[in-house]
Amino acid sequence: MPQRNEDDRSKKIVFVSNCLLNASNKVQEFARYPGMFTQVVQTLDKYGVGLIQMPCPEVLHMGCQRWWHSRNLYDNAGFRHFCRTLAEQMVDYMENYAIVGYDVVAVLVCDGSPTCGLTVSSYYENGGGHPAEPVRSLRKQPGIYTEELLKAIQARGIQAPPMYGLLMDDREKTNEQIIAEFDEFIRGRLS
Ligand code: SF4
């Protein structure tokens, strides 16, 4: 069989949470940039890495008019099943890249999100109670989509890519600080 010619592709890909490329999908009051988090795109472009925008489970499930929500409210069979269905298609991409030896450099998600958090996700201490005054905290556990994505990767028998959570809920950190830390992570991953 004739050898296929090489082209300019780097064969390096990062999967990113949907709202990093479209702030309008964030729950109301949580967007930190008007449209795209452009520095994420610039950082990946600087290293010649392509990106795949993962679907936004919350918008697809609850719409843009949704209330703030929490991990313990989203932690139900229906939402998990929905997230798993979305995750399976992302794992199809990963499996196809694994077949040809492309490098999934990372999965980039939004820490603090009840759905796309990695190391922390929001939790309502009084979830299930009166909705007027939810008591919100961050707990050290992944969001529901992230958890289902990891399970789907494991079930498929492919190697889990490194995961990285941008701490978008941390108002003490500027976008520049968040990006500087991410840049360091990507640089380390590619070196
Ligand atoms: S963090 Fe996830 S669920 Fe929340 S807006 Fe972004 S993509 Fe959607």
Image: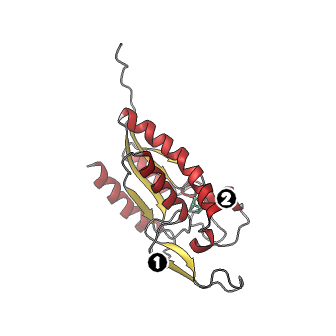
Residue 185 visible from this viewpoint:
yes
Q: Decide: few, some or many residues near mark 2? Use Cα within 10 Å; few <14, some 14-19, many ≥20.
A: some
Query: Can you say whether 21 is above or below 71 in the image?
Result: above
Residue furthest toward the top?
1
Quarter of the rendering containing residue 18: bottom right
Q: According to the image, label 2 marks what residue?
A: 59
Q: Amino acid at mark 2?
A: Val
Q: How is the image coloured?
A: secondary structure
Horizontal relation, residue 47 to residue 84: left or right: left
Q: Position of residue 146 (x, y in %)?
A: 50, 60
- Asked if ligand 1 lies within 8 A of label 2, the reply is yes
Q: Residue at position x 56%, y 54% from top?
A: 84
Residue 86 spot, x, y in % from top left: 58, 50
Which of these two is toward me, 105 or 139? 139
- Ligand 1 is found in the corner quadrant, namely bottom right
Which disc, if any, is residue 172? 1
Residue type (three-letter) at the residue carrying disc 1: Glu
